[in-house]
Image: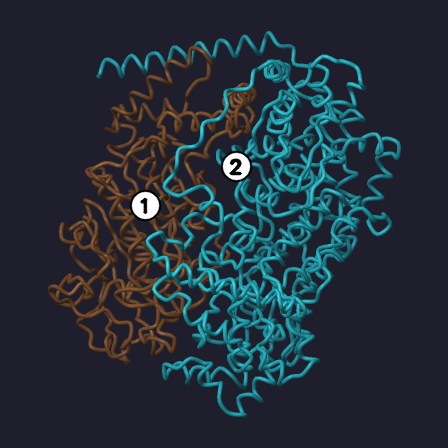
Chain colours: A brown, B cyan
Amino acid sequence: MNRRFFLRSGGIALASIGVSLSAPSFLERALLAQTSDRLTGGRRKTLIAIFQRGAVDGLNMVVPHGERAYYDLRPAIAIPKPQPGNAEAALNLDSFFGLHPVLTPFKSLWDSKRLAIVNAVGSPDNTRSHFDAQDYMESATPGRKGTPDGWLNRYLQSKTDPTRSLFRAVSLTQTMPRILQGSATTLTISNLADFTIRAGRSSSSVQGGFEEIYDQSVNDVLSGTGKETFEAVNFLKKANPGQYQPENGAQYPRSPFGNSLFQIAQLIKAGVGLEVAFTDVGGWDTHVNQGNSRGQLANRLLDFSGGIGALTTDLGKLMDDVVILTMSEFGRTVRQNGNRGTDHGHANAMFVIGNNVRGGKVYGRWPGLKSEQLYEGRDLALTTDFRDVFGEVSRKHLGTPNVQAVFPGYNSSESKFLNFLS
Amino acid sequence: MRIFKQNFTAAVQVARRALALVSIAAVFATPLSIDVGAQEKTKSKASRLSDAQRILHLLNRLGFGARPGDVERVKAMGVERYIEQQLNPGKISDALAESKVKDLSTLSMSTAQLYEKYPQPGQLIRQLQRRGDLPDDLAVARQNRGKASESQTPGQPASGASMMPEAMPRTATESNVSRADSVGAGRNNEEYRRIIRDYYLQNGLQQPQRITAELQASRILRAVYSERQLQEVLVDFWTNHFNVFAGKGADRWLLTSYDRDTIRPNTMGKFHDLLLATAQSPAMLFYLDNFQSASPNAPVGGNRRNRARARGESVLDSLSGGRRQERRMNRYPEMRPAQDPNMPQAPAQPPRRPRGINENYACELMELHTLGVDGGYTQKDVQEVARCFTGWTIFAPRGGGAAAMTLMGKGARENAGKFYFNARMHDEGEKTVLGQKIPAGGGMKDGLLVLDILARHPSTANFIAKKITRYFVQDNPPSALIDRVAAQFSKSNGDIRETLRAVFLSPEFDSPEAYRAKVKRPFELAISAIRTLGAETNGGPQLHQWIARMGEPLYLYQTPNGYSDTAESWVNTGGLLERLNFGLTLASNRIPGTRVDLKSLAGAVANGQAVDKASIMDRFLNLIVAGEISPRTRETLLKQLDQEVGPPIQPVAVEPASRADNMAGNNGNNIQPRQRRQQFVRADANITDPVTRIVGLILGSPEFQRQ
């Protein structure tokens, strides 16, 4: 589907060359990449990074039902032990961990060994400020605020893209997130349909005017960017995102998060050369009335897993080349607070999803929840530095030649990888 | 399939070759009187700017571009006099700009007043609760809120939102509204918002989001209307040099004073004074955490907190009872349990970072504010500087709780959010900074000494000279110029005015190499577009929203290095597309609160007579880009004048989430959802007449992106 689609649209682009005399350098590069494995070294790998902003309660997302302390410390909000026929109970993963009952899409991914969990993972810095912790997770330099770029951008810098795709890194957000800031070119698109000249009834003629204006003066950096911009706009138009139909019966939640994932799927299928996609989803800061098997956290998890489940269904076989990685700035207190919620904690859980993930397993040493095992007497302790997870994805999935450059000041080493990727 | 691919590749090559031939032919065939790129210009042009170009250049670099008539005014006045005038803004009367900002009431309020009048809803409720003043309806609504539904307290951002506060586009994905949520829960939240809204109305309170919105509006209005253009340019420059992020906790309340009391009075004085002002500004102290930085040997506080943490209790729990603790709070108001708006929901706050030395400020002070990263300091210097600044803190940094205020009385209330030196937090030992001994027992003098050393350091002179010349001259300023300017900086003891004068009067400043060599940043682009068309604006969020979309929301740059000032940071696909759309939207009068009158601008040349379209177009070319546009662009524009308007637009296909949802910050972070939603629904351009179309095109041309 991928290649066929591309050639079709390539043909259209070709037809237009004769008329406008605009060389489709971006299209040409992308086409060459598609037709020659030499340039890309095979198929293109894509990472979809998802940030759960607000610190999701990892302990109710990936339930340690084998821990007595979990039930002792969370009398009102704990998820019941797995029990056949009980829809309120955790979905059993192994004898010790379970999933929140609304995470059924994740359960089937787990069962087919396409979902791995990294537990007790996070930032070694002990900050409990959302602001600082998100900053550190995105810069991947915990404790250092001055780092000018995000780690996903440093990954892009570490490896040249032979196709120089304009859609190499796309953030489906309204502003460029910290994680993608930096000198490598990235794109922020909140809505694919908006990625165009918007002049109402004159849109197409105005765009034509701009294309002519920017087609001149070859040495000018603005004109170069202008030309590339219109190539990208036109290319996306041909991909016709408005007409996109998900495949394999996938149904995305009608939520902003679902919409973002829906658009990421469009970009992947359009073969635009997407290597890094990012989006985020909020609402996890559950200090009050968190709920248990139902309630506000359950609702957020429903949207979260429904979206990701639809994405994996929609992408189908394409998931061979895709890894979905979820993250959240820190975990939440093991003990429920006086408002049936949880406060800011420390280590947390991440999901890694893909057809080539060594799934069906929880990675990372479990530190336990007995009071002497807790971090600062209250939080899940950390046993895996998030840079070891990010590093493994950068190295083994995306293929950075230089993990060290992506994580400056950290002794990244393959020996520390958890090997959730083969 | 394979054959097809080969054909395609071959065809591309043929087309490329043809294109190359055509472009070569074009180069030879077109006698470029005026070229586009700065680089080409230098080859084909005289080695000096014309008088008109020089004036335009001045208006672009010392200000935010020319309004209609400005070139003539400067011409009459003389270039040198204009520079002198701009270097002395105090002598320029500025009634228009002041009248434009006079309704922005937060600008003149103290930080304490802002805390009082613009409280965070969550914090307000807790204070009312503690005082026993929480109205019943609010208590009930709060109890029901979130039940079986959303997580967010109104006014309490999801953390994602806490990083991207008001007047800023929210990512669609930040929204918490899941349509799966039950209707009843939605109603509970709506009810809660309504009751909060009513409470605010009845008590004369306003949402804190307004503070940043007004500050942003004031920057826009002054940049557009002020006669003190250089002052506004320098406010932009120094605000970025000493960047503070409004999305970090209390900085939302602290930035108003930062702009008014820290930056503005010091833009053209001694650098040392500016540096000191920032070092003592609560905004910077909060942003870079210095307000928390305490000697590990500080007598009280730390141990108790650690003990509490070890027991798994929150600090508030351990502090809330007993008079002794209250007395302690009285003595150390900054040690009150955190009321960080980043995490205000927790009735019992989790403990913050353990007290001790925090090096953030020390690090950025040297790397970004003074010496520069290669300025010749070590990590040891950073540690020593951090020790010197322990105790430089903020009194009641988050406004203080109601209980604390009652305890401390009215005097305390007025001092909320102000700088003060807390000797008990200070590390009294001896320090060595950049080889210089700072004797033990210096107290607050330690920090002052450090600032003296840094302000006088040759690396600082060089770093500031480079940054100023890059900002005012070109992205890669000649090293000879940097050296001269640095020497002037040192010689004048860091006098910014003298330093700027050396830049403006240098031959490099108005050389052809510098002419239109800078790509405008989004803020500069927006302001110069409004000025060049003589448009009127209220500086409202709808306009700021465009500046944000183009990539430069004011006070919302997260990291301490501030917005970049070089072209490569701003010339990218997404940003350029929004620039083009901004020009179109402005020209077609679709930015609420901002008005252009193209008819009268066109009419000024028509003079009641029937004139041909081409002369109207030339009128706008002269107005917007001083007529400096390539013949081919002019041809393109001429063609556009005759283009028909397209068919009426089809309704946009329904997206999974409607556009309104994407644009509105409907994540519960507001108590006036409907109003906010309207505020942020973007109206796209809808161009139906040729004049609007060519004005939009000229505003989007490469020429107008430069200054």
Which chain is mark 1 on?
A
Circle on res. B411: none
Residue B18: quarter of image: top left
Position of residue B181 measured from the top left corner of the image (x, y, whole percent): 34, 56
The part of the image, by quadrant, that contains residue B614 is top right
- Please name the residue shown 22% across and 37% down the image: A318
Side of B308 relative to B424 (left or right) = left
Is residue A374 visible to us here?
Answer: yes
Q: Which amino acid does label 1 sit on?
A: Ile
Label 1 – label 2 distance at C-alpha: 23 Å
Rendered-image quadrant of the N terminus of chain A: top left
Q: Tell me which residue sits at (45%, 27%) in the image.
A: B650
Q: Mark 2 sits on what residue?
A: B575
Q: In front here: A329 or B353?
A: A329
- For this orientation, the residue located farthest to the left is A84
Whether tag 1 and tag 2 are in contact, CB under 8 A, the answer is no
Q: Which amino acid, by three-letter code, is at mark 2?
A: Gly
In the rendered image, which residue does mark 1 sit on?
A48
A401, A272: nearer the viewer = A272
Residue at x-position 28% and y-position 68%: A292
- Disc 1 element: strand
